[in-house]
Structures are given as structure tokens and as C-alpha cells.
Amino acid sequence: MSKARKESGLEAVNTGSKDFVTIKLAGQTLGIPVLAVHDVLNAQNITRIPLAPKSVAGVLNLRGRIVTAIDLRERLDFPPRENGAKSMSVVVEHKGEPYSLLIDSVGEVLSLEDGAFEKNPVTLDQRWREVSAGIYRLDGELLVVLAVDKLLDFDAHVAA
Amino acid sequence: MDDLLNEFLTETAESIDVVDVEVVKLEQDPNNKAVLDNIFRLVHTIKGTCGFLGLPRLEKVAHSSENVLGKFRDGELEVTGDAITVVLESLDRIKEILHGLEATEEEPAGDDSELISRLDAIAAGEKAVTQKNISEAKTTGKAQEKTETVEEAVPAPARELKPGEVSLEELEAVFQATAGPDADEGENADGTTGNVQNDLFDKFGGEDATTVVGHLVANHLDKDEKLSEFFASDDENVRKARFVGLLTTALEGDAEDAATIAASMISAPGFGDEQFDLLTGQLKAVLNEMDIEAEISDDVLMGFEIARAPMIEQSQKLENSKAEQSQLEAEQKAQAGTEPSRSSQSIRVSVDLLEDLMNMVSELVLTRNQLLQMVRQMDDSEFTVPLQRLSQCTTELQEGVMKTRMQPIGNAWAKLPRIIRDLSVELDKKIELDMRGAETELDRQVLELIKDPLTHMVRNSADHGLETPAERLAAGKPETGTVRLNAFHEGGHIIIGISDDGRGLSTKKLRAKAKERGLFGDAELEEMSDGQIHKLIFHAGFSTAEKVTSVSGRGVGMDVVRSNIEKIGGTIDMNSKEGKGTTFQIKIPLTLAIVSALIVEATGERFAIPQISVLELVRASANSEHKVERIKDTPVLRLRNRLLPLVYMNKILGLSDGVEEEKTDDAFIVVTQVGASTFGIVVDQVFDTEEIVVKPVAPILKEISVYSGNTILGDGSVIMILDPNGIAVKTSTNVTEDAADERQTKAVAASVQDKETLMVFLAGTENQKAVPLSLVARLEDIEVDKIETSDGQPMVQYRGALMPLVLVNQSNGFRTEGRQPVLVFSDNDRSMGLAVDEILDIVEDQLEIELSSDNQGMVGSAIINGKATEIIDVAYYLKLAYSDWMNSQKAQTNIKPVENTSVLLVDDSSFFRNMLKPLLSVAGYKVTTVNTAAEALKLRDQGADFDLIISDIDMPEMDGFEFAQNVREDGRWRDKPLVALSSFAGDQHFTRGREVGFNDYVVKLDRDALLISLAQQLKIHGDAA
């Protein structure tokens, strides 16, 4: 896990605080390091891709760039979004390719104290443990830090 | 990297490539001074720059090869193949060092002394011979002396660098000092040598008069046949300039320069005193014409005598040194020629920058399209006019940028002459490379991608395609084989043809090879057309050369070539005639960046299909002439008397479960070409075509073979680009290869006829099994509790009699409850039930037994409905049920044959061979099977003997009728009973069969009829004998 933390830029754990964009997905609060977020989008016109892996929702046009949309609910094993429910997306980059993560809503940007950080609990679901870089204790809820690189590293996922 | 070094590397790499080509050209045409001079100049430049940059190793190699080239140029060395080989080697070494330099920015360590000594040996080896000529010619002129100083300086290692340069510069100096009257005048006006003669020059009328006389004499010469041949080598203007120069120097009394010029003018041997007198006569006539005073005229003629000796001498030794004049001329060209002006009009731009530009322009085009679409929806927008301007500018910009990326295909061919040259030496063949359309331009990205496949193919043609000179002569062909490259534009594509006039592909060898490699079975190979067989070379691991040479046959084959070409959206086709040669045709798009695509819709989703692979669009509906028909569930379209296999886009993409497609007989069909095969893609809707910029798909989607990329359309939405190759592969592997050849062999109709109706079921294992439906009498569902056992054999009461039940798989029991499905096979009053697990389907399919089986009860395996299916051997189960089945039959019909009666079975269908052989064997015959009539006749000629021959009627190449005629005509089988076996059951067939000599005619699968017929024929025959 320590490797995962390094990759997601959390080696600076002891130096104070980190900023995260918080997102909501099926009631769960997730955080993405603010510097990793390129864009936050409202619902977009997404082109479906038949035969694509389930977690790929399709492709969309972001100012002339073709962005692959990842259905985060599918990726993280949540039930599918209800019909007509609003969605937003957060655009991140992985290995030079832009990806748009489909989520339910985006919250505020939080600056979180390192003191509130904890490693993944050992009992965490395997699928989650792969993509979580650790947990922050917030008031009344927990924030799971998404390890974007792991999340989008489909090869490794397939191999595992 | 140091900018200077970087530039040096790029430039030198380019120069070396040119030199490579030019050296090969030189070998073929050793007298081409222009080529030689070009080479010399390039190598000289390389050497010079190396010295400047401090690259001693490179410099030494360049210097030594320059030495040799210098000797070629001066005519002191003969251009021989061996010498050229060493020079090429030195070029390779230079390239090697350059690579090292590029990688490390330092000259790699290495010892070139061996190569250098060989180069020097070549330079020196010929010296003794040429030295003599030089001393002979010593008096003839300055230029000669200069070359000699070069000559002598060469062996002195300490001065290695200098001589070449000196030679070049001084030669030029000589030329400039002598050739132009302008230069002469100034120099000699101040000169002290010829004051007296200067008077003559002035008296004569100075520069003007000399020029006029020179021109006139030159003109006269042109008209005088006797003289013009000696002055033929120069073009008119040069010749005039020479005469003017000669006259000027002669009149000025500059003997040395006059001699040089005079010598340089003579281009052919045989110029003697007589000819010189003629020339003087011409001069005299001109002088007379100009009304020159007699005294001055005489003086001029006297002065002109100075040229006599050098001219005659020059002519005599011309074989050895006919180089001078053209050399000087070429020198002049090199110095004053096109080079400077060219460099000032072009600049070097890095490829990255161009790529970036291209990308930006692509984006611009997309945005423009988007804007256009938006404005189109608004009426009377104030944006319309400026947008039109923008649109136009964008289009022009796009074209402009595209042009910067265009390069002549000749660039990809640049290395080929060298390769062919090396090959011809290595393989000892005479090969001519004929390159046409080298100026045809295509995108540099595409160019890069086809470079290697092209090189490989040319190599193949030279290595495998062309025969050795001896073989060629024996085949009545010219000794020199030709490999021809031809490129031209056609539509938005570039077509590249690679052809050789070699031995062509041998279908026989290919067949043997395919068999040896186990790629196909015998039966399959036999049924393949020549075209199909030829295409086997595109199969992985296929090389036709019998021996692996160092050149080709290293396992990288045409399959790689083909996949590389297909990768860039191209197609490759081939045509070969044994003994005549092979032609490959490659068709590739001009550019990969922007393609025209057809936008289609399937189940509400839009997709783009590259226009390049779309042949046509067909609207099919139930009432029109084009309607979708079905063979069982397989949809096909009748299109101009051909059957076009169809695939449903929504089915391929998994958008529908395949149920609703049934109603879509009203459909748009995109007829697509993949490789040489065509198939139709059924879509719901077709929109217009659009120019799209292909963008690669995200890595996660790369695995999906049906997409080749994606793009943004004018309306801003993202669309996936379909890859017809991928679709073809996904649909079935059969489509790709077979469809095309079906078309060729017009076998479509026949193949429909050949289809067998099969009952497909499951029994025991997971694999589906099948049996010809014609053998099955009924299907029954028997209640499990009705199954009884008697004498250890499961039985069931069936229609008032006991019917034995047999399990397909003995280890698998009967069902324990419910009903047991049973296939009933009936014969006379006996029946047998074959218990199966589940009856799946009745399928009409072409039955190709792919693998024969050693397993009892199994005829073999075949692909049915795309699944591996075991074909069961009914005869085996019949025997299980009734050990006396066959016997009883025979008893009834009294057809038991005499022991060891031998039967020959001729049938192209492996299914029937496999079905009938056990059947006949069981019936007591000794069966031999062959799969073509030709093979059967071969057996006859080899002396094989049979009591009876059974032949299929419908066979490729030689059909049954023809075979029968053949048998009846003569040979040892003339009187053998002959039984026809056919699926054609019409009266006319019976009649025709009898006419050509069949004794009987039996419909296929009527087993009893066959056995009876056999027995009858044998009996008749026996009685007759």
C-alpha cells in the first residue's frame, strides 16, 4: 500500500495538509487530489461504445479532445445510477490520456490535515483496496482518497 | 546535441543515401561523368566537413573512398564491380560511424585500416597502368599535370587530406582561367607573356571579333559531318565558348592554355592532320566571310596551328582520357549550377513541428465543421460571410500543410537500387530494377510505414521471384530479370505495383508446403482455386524459396507485409502466372490523417465507416430486386448474380439480441471490401459522408478490434470509426478469404447445392454432434420408464416390435426420468434408436470434414454453425444394435459380394468418402478412395486394378461424366463396371450417365440402392466374364 500512496502524491503526509476535491458517489464521499483534477463537467453527451468493457461509459468531446468516460459506479461496484438521475464528471489524466469519471455530484474542495489520514482498514473490500490511497476522518463521515492511477490502470486490473 | 553536429548528421545521412544510389547507377553506366562527379562532390563534402568538425575516423574512410572515386573521375581507374563493392562498403562504414555519432555524439571506436588499405590498394593497383598514360599525355596540358600531382601525392600518408582538395580547386582554377574569354581578357591584359601576340589579338578586332569567329566556326562545324563527330560531346553553347576561348588564347599566344582547351574539345578518337586541315579550312572560310584582311587572316591561321598538336594527340589517347572536357564542364556545373539557388529556396523544418502543425490544422478543420453546422441552422446569420472566408482559408491551410507532409515515393525507394545491386552480386543473378512514378507523392507518415514492406517485397521478388540467368535462358527469357516498381495516383489512393518477370508462384509447391505445414487438409487444398493457393503466401510462416538465403526467408514473411499494409488502411492484391512472373498491387490511402467516412446508424448509435472500404450502398427491401434472403438463418443478398454474405451491424456490436433483425428486410446495406473479399454490413440508416480526422482510441478500447479510431463530427459529438477488417474477423474467419474466391470461381450456386442437411444434437459430451438428416427415419421422444432391457441390450417397444436403443456415448446412461429423445434409423422392417441428450437444430450447411477421426463411431469433425461438430458414423451404431444388421440385409437382398471384391470410390466430398467407406467395408468390399477423377486415372495408369468403380458426378476439374468417358475410351478399366453416384436425380442425368458409359446410376445416400446396384453390376460382369 505504501507504494500506492507514493504514486498518488501522498508522500507529503507529514508536512501539514492536502487539498482534495470531494465527490459523491452513491452516498459515499470520495476525494481526488485537487491537482489531479483538470475539469469538472456537468452532464455531457456521451457516445456509447458497443463491446467496450462495462466500466467504460463511452466517449465525449471536451473542447475538441476525445475523452473516455469511466462509469465510476460500475468501476467501484456500486449499483447503476437510476434513470434520469443527474450525473457530473471529473476529468483526470492518466498516462497522457484524458478520462472523465462519471459521478453523482461534486462537493467543495477540502483542505485536510494530515493528522486525520489513516491507512486503508485491512478489512476493506479487495476491489476498493486497489483504488483507495487511504482514508480521511471527516466530521460525521469518511473520505476515501481515490488513487487515480490505480483506478485507471485497467491492465493491472485485468491481470489481477 | 550540438546544432552543428546535428545538422552535419542530417545532411550527411542524406548525402550518403544519394551516393548509395548514384554509385549503383555508376556501375551500370561507368561513363556517366555527371553521376561520377556528383558522387565525388558529395563524398568530398563529407570529408571536408569531417575535417572541420574533427572526426578523424570518418575523415579517413571518406578520404580513401574519395581517392578511388577521384581516380574513376579522372579516368585513371576503370569502374569495376569489385571496386564499386569496396566503395559501397566504405559508404556502409560511414553510415555505421554516423549512427554511432548520432547515439553518443562521439565517433565510435573502431579500426578501419583494413578497409582503408583495400581502398588504397584499389587506388594504387591501377596506378601503374594509368601512370604511363599520364606521362604520355604530359605535354598535353596543365590539367593533366595537375591530376598527376594528385596522383603522386596520394601515397604520402602525411598529406592525405590535401591532394583531393588541391586537385579540385586547381582544376577549377584552370577552367576559369581558360574557358571564358571574359576572364582571359582581364588576366592577359596585365600579363607579360604575350605582348606581341596581343597585338594580333587586338589587330584581329579584340574580343568581339574573336567571339563572332568562334561562334561561326562552331556553327560550321555542326553542319560538317566529317568534323562534327569529333566535337560532339559538348552542347552547342559550350562548344562555342570553347572555340572562342581557343581562338583567344591562340591569338594571345598563351600556348599552354590553348593546348588545354584544344585538347578538351576533341571528343572522339581518329582526329588526325587531315581533320585539322578541314577545321582550319572552316576557320579560313569564316575569316573570308567576315572580310578580314588577308594578312591578319593568315596570322590568325598560323596562330591557330598551335591547337593542331594537342588536338590530334588528344584524339589519339582519347580512350584513356576522354574525360577532361566533360569533367571541366561538370565542375563548372557543380560550382555555378543549381546548388546555391536550391538551398536558398528551401529550409529544413523538423518533422515534429510539421506533425504539430498537422494536428492543429486537423483541430481547426473540426472546429470549422462544427461552426458551419451551427450557422447552417441559423437563418441569415451575420456570421455566414466571415465564416465562409474562414472556411476557405482553413481548407487552403489544410491543403498547404498536407502538402508539406507529402513526399515523393521515390524516397522510400532510395535504398532499393543498392539492395538490388547487392542481391545480384550475392545471388549471382542479373537484375534490373525499373522504377516508375518515383515522383508520386504521398504522406510521409504513410511513406514511413510502407518503406519496410516495400523493401521486403522487392527483396522477395529478386530473391524468390527471379530465376538465375541459366534458368532464365533455359526458359527462353532474357538473362536479365526485371523487378518493376510502379506508383501512381488513383482517386484518393496511391497504387504501387511490384512485379517481376520471374518464375511465378508454383501452386504445386504452395500446396505441398501448406500440407507440410499442416495449414490445411488435403481435401481443402484440392478445392482451392489457384488464386486462393497463391494467397497462401500471406499466411504466417510461409516462404516459397526452397533454400533460405541470407536475403530472405527468415520467417518474416508476406503475412507481416500484409498486416502492415492493412494497418494503414491499405489493401494488397496479387496475381501470378507460373513461369511468367508475379505482380503485387498495393493500394493505400494518400494520407492517414484526414479520411472521408460514411456515417451510418445502427440501433440509434452512429458510426463512421471509412469510405475507402465502402464499395457501394444497396437499399434492400422485400419488394425491390434486392432483397435479403436467408439460408436457414444466414442472411445473404443477391447482388448482380452473386451472393453477398451479410452481417448485421447491431448484432456484431451486441446492440441487439438478434431477434428484431428478422423484421429488417428493409435495410441499408453497406457493401464493404476487405482484402479481396466483399461482404455487406446491414445498417438501419445511412447519413452523408464526412471528412473526419482519425484519432486513436483510448488504450482501454484498443482491444476492441471493430474500431479503428474515433473522431469528433461537425455537430460536436464523438463517433466511433468502424474497422471493416475487424468486423470481417469478428464475423467469421471464413468471410475474409473465401468470399473473394467464391466470386472468382462462381462457386456460390454450386456451394448452395452442395449443402447437406444435418441434424445437430447433443449427446454425452459438450460438443455438438451431427448426422445427415437423410439417414434419420424419425425423431421420437420415448418415456424413460418404457425402456426395457433384454439380453443385456436396452430395448423399447416401438410400433409393435422391439427396437434396440444405443447410446452415443456408452459411459453416459439413459435419462432417469421424463422422456428420452431418440433418433430412429430404419431399414426394411428393422429399426434402431440412438439415444441422445438433446436435439438442437436442423442445419443446412456445407459439410467439410476437417479432421477425420480414429474414434469408433465418428466419421470426423466439421464446423457447423461456427462450432466444431462431430459427425457420427451411423454404420457403427447400427452394428452395435444388430451385430447381424448388414448380414441380414445382405441375406435379404442377396448381395453378399465375393470375398475381396475391390471397389474404387471416386468422390471429392470427404464426407461421402468417409460415410461410404465404412459402409462398403462393412458390406464386405475392399475399398480404395480417391478424391479426384485425375487421381483415379493416375491409379489406373499405375496399374491398379479394381472389380468395380463408383464415381461421384459433381466433381471439380473433371466431373464424373468426363471421367467415365475417359475410363471407357481405353485403358485397363475399359470393361469394368462403373456406377455413378450423384445428388442430381433427374432423368436427364440418368440418361446422360448411361450414355457416357456408366452401368448404373444411384442417388447419393440411397444406401440400399447402392449396395444392390453394386451386387448387380458385379454379377452381370461376373456372368459376362
Image (spheres, rainbow, N blue to C red):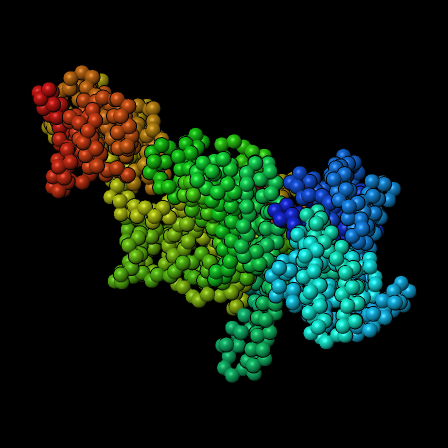
x and y percentages locating residue B11 in the rendered image: 73, 54
Residue B677 horizontal/vertical position (percent): 40, 50
Q: Is residue B489 left or right of residue B818?
A: right
The one nearer the camera, B56 or B682, is B56
- The quarter of the picture where the C terminus of chain A appears is top right
Q: Is residue B964 above or below residue B708?
A: above
Seen at 41% across and 32% down, the residue is: B512
Q: Is residue B306 above or below residue B1018?
A: below
Question: At 32% from the left edge and 46% from the top edge, which residue is drawn?
Answer: B745
Depth check, front residue: B763 or A117: B763
| Nearest the eye: B429 or B595 | B429
**Residue at screen point 76% across, 72% down:** B294
Can residue B279 be seen?
Answer: yes
Point out residue A5 in the picture as x, y percentages from the top left corner: 71, 45
Q: Residue at x 42, y 37 (%)?
A: B506
Q: How many marks?
A: 0
Identify whether B790 is placed above or below B684. above
In the picture, residue A108 is in which quadrant?
bottom right
> Between B861 and B588, which is closer to the camera in this rendering?
B588
Q: Which image quadrant: the N terminus of chain A?
A: top right
B108 to the left or right of A66: right
Q: Does the rendering let one see residue B461? A: no
Please identify the residue farthest to the front as the structure is shown: B294
